[in-house]
Image (cartoon, rainbow, N blue to C red):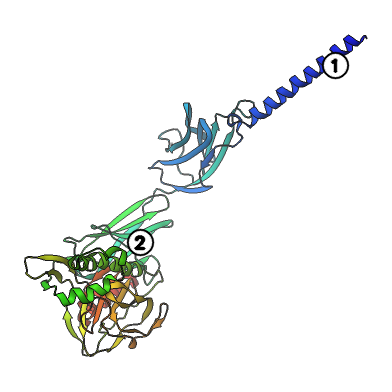
Amino acid sequence: MNKNSKKASSLGSFITILFLCGIAIGAYYALKSPAFEKNRPKIDLPLERFWNTHKSFNVKITDDSGLKEISAYLSNNKERIKIASITLKNPVKKYDLKIKYPKIGFEYGSDNFKLTIYATDTSKWNFFRGNTALKVSRLKIDDKKPDLFSLTTSYGITRGGSALAIFKATDENLKELYIQTNFGKKFKPTPFYKEGYYAVLLAWPLKEKRFSAKVIAIDEAGNKTRARLSFFLKNKKYRTSYLQAKESFINGKITDLAEDKPEETQNLTPTQKLRFINEIYRTQNDALIKRYASKVDHNRFDEFNLKPFYPLKNGKVVGSFGDHRYYYYKNRENIISESYHLGIDLASIKMDNILITNPGVVVFANYNGIYGNSLIIYHGLGLYTVYGHCSTLLKSRGDVVKGGETAAKTGATGLALGDHLHFSTMVQGVFVRPAEWMDSKWIQTNITDVINTAKKMIDK
């Protein structure tokens, strides 16, 4: 072979190699491109779930490159049928597949159902066939609603007050159980006495004109049962007061409390500061109390023996619950602020002992704005007591207190003009009338007797 032929042959080989390298490089980058992504679609389906066959449910399917085909099969021990077959002309990255029980052509009665879902994307991977995902879930069929009925309740409930209800709720797969009210509040029940029975303290908020409540029971399959709780409703009227905001009050307590919130109050006039402290700051302080006084324990109980709360020996009531207070400046027509008093004020001697009548756990012991140094104590069944304006706190958060213990000293911290105790009672975050919980007859009739009656009914 002459030199020219060898050169031509070498050049041809070199060009071929370059060509093949170009193809290889091109193929490499092509396979690395999004069009050839290797990730399978994601099917959000648990390995096992409950299903009420009267209701459909959605399965979320996602993919990076886009979904083009989805199919679903339902099977039991005897047969397997296709319940969904979808081809997407315009691929999407998210798809909610609705699963419906077939109306005909499938035998009902087996608890061994399986749902199988296939999803294929638009990727060019796998020889242009795309990536396919497979997910299988065992379906536990449950079309039975929870059993639910009211056992007994307090006879009535007063606006601003409390009541007790005891009921039965049973279901093998019970998921949610709560009391829904007309004003949006959900009260949580506590297990009572024997398996399947529950008790709940309810509250009718001061500002709500109407009250209604029903128990809601929902199982894992979404079956829902409702049972209305019946009470005689007492629409109590509360006092309205008009208080003059004197210069000494505005330039004293109000100015001092405004220093708690310097950024919000530094550019306000004296009367604007009063409104901020009495309304906005008060709302923030109330929200803190509600946050600490909203939980309920889930330990089963069969007794709730309470003595009437009375935290000050020989204490005199100087401020009532539910009092709608209007503050005016100079003349009564010049109303500058308003608020509701959500407790009672008790006065005795300076730095008097504050007694915790019933045992409980301290859930809050700190400063809280207009309430000053405060304690919040949990007594069980969603019932809390609040002690404000204290000069000294003798207990810390987490302390267990016994009935009759001294937990703090009265004072004038917060929005208080003289030494006294602000005392509030709460049911699952709702302020309620302390007068009820300070009345032995009310406690006996509305709490103790209801519990004893329920136990007798259960034991029959």
In the foreground, 453 or 273: 273
Image quadrant for the N terminus?
Answer: top right
Image quadrant for the C terminus?
Answer: bottom left
In the foreground, 97 or 64: 64
Badge 1: residue crowd in 10 Å (few <14, some 14–19, many ≥20): few
Q: Is residue 360 above or below residue 156?
A: below
Label 1: state its secondary structure. Answer: helix
Q: Is residue 22 something that shows in the picture?
A: yes
Q: Which mark is residue 10?
A: 1
Q: Which mark is residue 169?
A: 2
Residue 124 position within the rendered picture, expressed as x and y whole percent measured from the top left: 60, 27
Q: Quadrant of residue 394?
A: bottom left
Residue 280 position within the rendered picture, expressed as x and y whole percent measured from the top left: 25, 64
Seen in the image, is 59 located left or right of residue 129?
left
In the foreground, 250 or 301: 250
Q: Amino acid at mark 2?
A: Ala
Seen in the image, is 88 located left or right of residue 218?
right
Residue 362 position within the rendered picture, expressed as x and y whole percent measured from the top left: 38, 78
Task: Answer with mark 1 or mark 2, whichever residue precedes in sequence.
Answer: 1
Q: Amino acid at mark 1?
A: Ser
Mark 1 or mark 2, whichever is nearer to me: 1
Residue at x 50% of width, y 35% of height: 72
- The residue furthest right is 1
Label 2: state its secondary structure. Answer: strand
Q: Is residue 369 above or below residue 353?
A: above
Q: Is residue 15 above or below residue 121?
A: above
Residue 136 position within the rendered picture, expressed as x and y whole percent measured from the top left: 55, 42
